[in-house]
Amino acid sequence: MKLKNDDSKVVGVLTGGGDCPGLNPAIRAVVLKARSMGWKVYGFHDGWAGVVDRDFEELTEISVADILHEGGTMLGTSRTDPRKDDKAYSSVVTMFSELSIDALIAIGGDDTLSVASRLASEGLPVVGVPKTMDNDLQATDFCIGFDSAVNRVTQSIDNLRTTARSHHRVMVVEVMGRDAGWVAVVAGMAAGADYIVIPEVAVSIDEIVESLERERAKEDRHRIVVISEGANVAGINEVSEQVDDRDQFGHISLASRDLGHTLAQAIEKATGMETRVAVLGHTQRGGAPTAFDRVLGSRLGVRAVEMVRRRKWGHMPALDGRIITEVPISDAVASNRKVDLELFEIARALF
Ligand code: F6P
């Protein structure tokens, strides 16, 4: 028989920002852990939008019975930023007393957790959980979703290599990564890319071409170039700040830059090597979570509930080596965590 805690609570949970595999395992862990202590759990739909609109459902063991292996998020998500609108923000603040919620667990990346951090700084009972396939939050080694994305991208590059090799082509592979090139570096290394272009490291088209030409002396005449969507390549383009397609957090839609195609054209023109491009897009975020993300989501979800019990407001569980630690959310969102340049140098040594 499960022990009931006298201090029975009602806890809310939401997922915000871009979805990724591993969110459902985290939601499941929050629900199962909280319910084992006799608490009630409300799942808000579509990120902060569900809090503003009071759009939620009660979650039980039955609601999460079959979601551990499912990608995406059973709660839905959105990029709603309630700070953009005073009415929406005060609706979030009053939600706690109106629904008698004792704590809210916000599972998200930089944007979602920035809202959580502000609420906590104003005395509201909020705990965070780090997720983003971009892996660019500070204060944690890994975010939910990164490992699944890396595995997906590695598999895609392996597939692209067989066709590139058959046709002796250059294959440019554009991957997600707005401010940091974690997915490009780790998946590129895992798949043996011949060049990796990331936002953190300045590069010109001439340097890329020179490296591909050098490689040409080898018998194997196909090449794989991996590029983060947020990178800049001197000589072919710069990020256009004029683009008007922005979300509520002010992010430009990078898909409209068409960076992969521009780079592919420039490479073909300069080298004369036939070049194709694959923009992996949202396939990187789709599908089932890896075992690593299932376990990480489960560990972080359970710890978040324990932190609610200890009233550790304004903090989130984080992975430090093999250990789960507890860090201020404000530390995690202070800036984007850039790719470790030592890691990039290792990747570059193998180009
Ligand atoms: O979740 C972060 C991210 O994957 C970025 O790398 C990418 O630029 C963005 O989401 C795209 O998301 P969407 O098209 O869903 O707004």
Image (cartoon, helix red, strand yellow):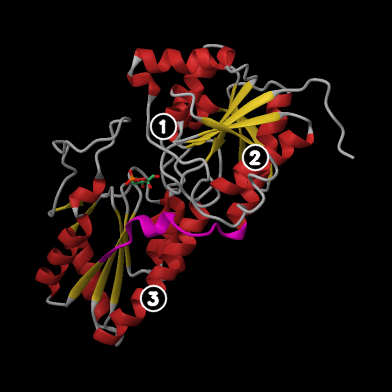
Camera-side mark, 3 or 2? 2
Q: Is residue 283 magenta?
A: yes
Residue 150's mark? none
Q: Sequence-wise, which precedes: disc 1 or disc 3?
A: 1
Question: Which residue is located at x 15 percent, y 59 percent?
Answer: 262
Residue 46: percent from left, percent from top: 45, 36
Residue 111's mark? 1
- State the CA–CA distance, disc 3 to disc 2: 34 Å
Residue 97: percent from left, percent from top: 58, 12
- Identify the residue under disc 3: 159
Residue 301's mark? 2
Residue 31: percent from left, percent from top: 67, 38
Question: Which residue is located at x 84 percent, y 29 percent?
Answer: 4
Q: Report the magenta residues as a range.
A: 278-291
- Give the residue type that dot 3 points to: Asn
Q: Quadrant of residue 80?
A: top left
Mark 1 surroundings: few (<14), some (14-19) or many (≥20) residues within 10 A: some
Q: Is residue 56 magenta?
A: no
- State the CA–CA distance, disc 1 to disc 3: 33 Å
- State the CA–CA distance, disc 1 to disc 2: 19 Å
Q: Secondary structure at mark 1?
A: helix
Question: Does 261 sit above or below residue 106?
Answer: below
Q: Secondary structure at mark 2?
A: helix
The answer to whether residue 94 of the structure is visible from this angle is yes
Residue 224 or residue 69, whichever sits in front: 69
Q: In the rendered view of the protein, which quadrant contains the C terminus? A: bottom left
Residue 67 or residue 109, whichever sits in front: 67
Q: Is mark 3 within 8 Å of ligand 1?
A: no
- Give the residue type that dot 1 points to: Asp
Q: Are marks 3 and 2 in contact (CB under 8 Å)?
A: no
